[in-house]
Image (spheres, helix red, strand yellow):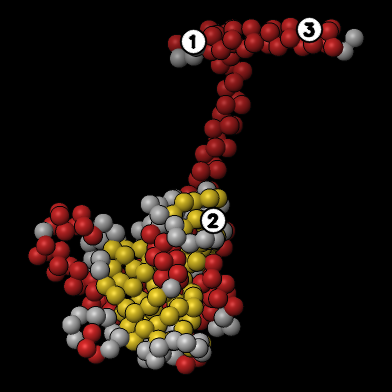
Amino acid sequence: MTNKNNKTEVSGLPENMSQVTLAIVFLDIINSTKFVQKHGAKKAAAWFQVHDKLARSLVYRHNGREIDRSDGFMLSFYNLGDAIQFALKYQETIPYKVPFDSRIGIHWTNIIEIQQEDKYTSVGAKSVELEGIGKATAARCMSICQEKQVLLTKAAYLKFKSMLNAQSYISKSTRTALVGLYQFKGVKNPQEIYAIGNSIEVLQPPPSGGKVKRIGGAKKIRSRARDRKFWEWIWWFNLRGSIICFLMALYILWPAIFDPNVRRGSEMQEYFWWADYINDFLFEANKKIEKISKFITDHYFK
């Protein structure tokens, strides 16, 4: 049933059609065909049923609707917050209960909603269908997702940011990031794409896909200090500490390594014999630089 708050009156539409504003969510099981080839149809079908039951349970709990299913789902939500909460909860739980990963793309759009007649649904037609460019946009957004990633179109991102109760749908650790500008096949204008998630790994910019070309944007999304976990801080200090120790050791040992008199008077010559070649190279390079500098000075500055 269509939510009246999301419905827009449009003249000239048949009785079974209406224009609505909603979130379209595409969920795709990554490499599902390879999974079937590897494990066989029987085992794959059993795992897909496990996945679908878990996913449908989440859809129901977050007030969504299943529009279509293939190797994933096309879903719709009248409330964008419900759609985002569903997607994040899905990626936090379900991939760890099944032997494959999924990706999710979300778009907020005006679209034509079609209520099919009973005589068609009785022979297999879907009870509700969606038609409009927004469906293609959501599908393209999903197609560039990496594993365990949730991507939002600019329309979905701006709508979510404008919601007064947006924070009630996400945890304090949830972060969004602009991952780039992409050109979707079949969509006129380039699209800004945003990632949303609870770890820095799922916020990384995805590359171009088969029907999507990456135009620009940051190559890497860096973690913010307030978002770093304890082990990330340990890694951060260890890396910088190691660099500082290396530079200090180099500063202390440099004179001994590159001074032949000091080196040959100790056992260091056996290990740092190559230092003489570096010294000779630097000496010759310095002579050439001085010669070039003198030539330029004599011919152009006198």
Residue at (57, 22) in percent of width and height: 253
Mark 3 crowdedness (10 Å alpha carbons): few <14, some 14-19, many ≥20: few
Residue closest to the eye, 212 or 222: 212
At x 83% / y 8%, what residue is drawn? 299
Amino acid type for the residue under numbered disc 3? Phe
Of the pair 117 and 291, the residue shown nearer to us: 117
Left or right of residue 58, residue 195 in this image? right
Work out which quarter of the rendered image holds the C terminus and state it: top right
Residue 72 image offset from top left, x and y in percent = 28, 68
Instruction: Report x, y in % for residue 288.
Output: 68, 8
Within 10 Å of disc 2 (Cα), the crowding (few <14, some 14-19, many 20+) is some
Marks 1/3 in contact by CB < 8 Å: the verdict is: no
The image quadrant of residue 249 is: top right
Task: Kindly report the distance in space between the C-alpha atoms of the residues bearing marks 1 and 2.
Answer: 53 Å
Separation of marks 1 and 3 at Cα, in angstroms:
35 Å
Judging by the rendered image, the residue that carries numbered circle 3 is: 295
Which quadrant holds the N terminus?
A: bottom left
User: N-terminal of the two: label 1 or label 3?
Assistant: 1
For the residue labelled by badge 2, is the local secondary structure a helix, a strand or a loop? strand
Disc 2 marks which residue?
Answer: 181
Q: Position of residue 112 (x, y in %)?
A: 43, 80
Residue at 85% across, 12% down: 300
Can residue 223 be seen here?
no
- Residue 273 bears which disc, if any? 1
| Rendered residue at 57%/58% (across/down) | 225
- Which amino acid lies under the numbered mark 1 shown in the image of this protein? Trp
Label 3 to label 2, Cα distance in Å?
50 Å
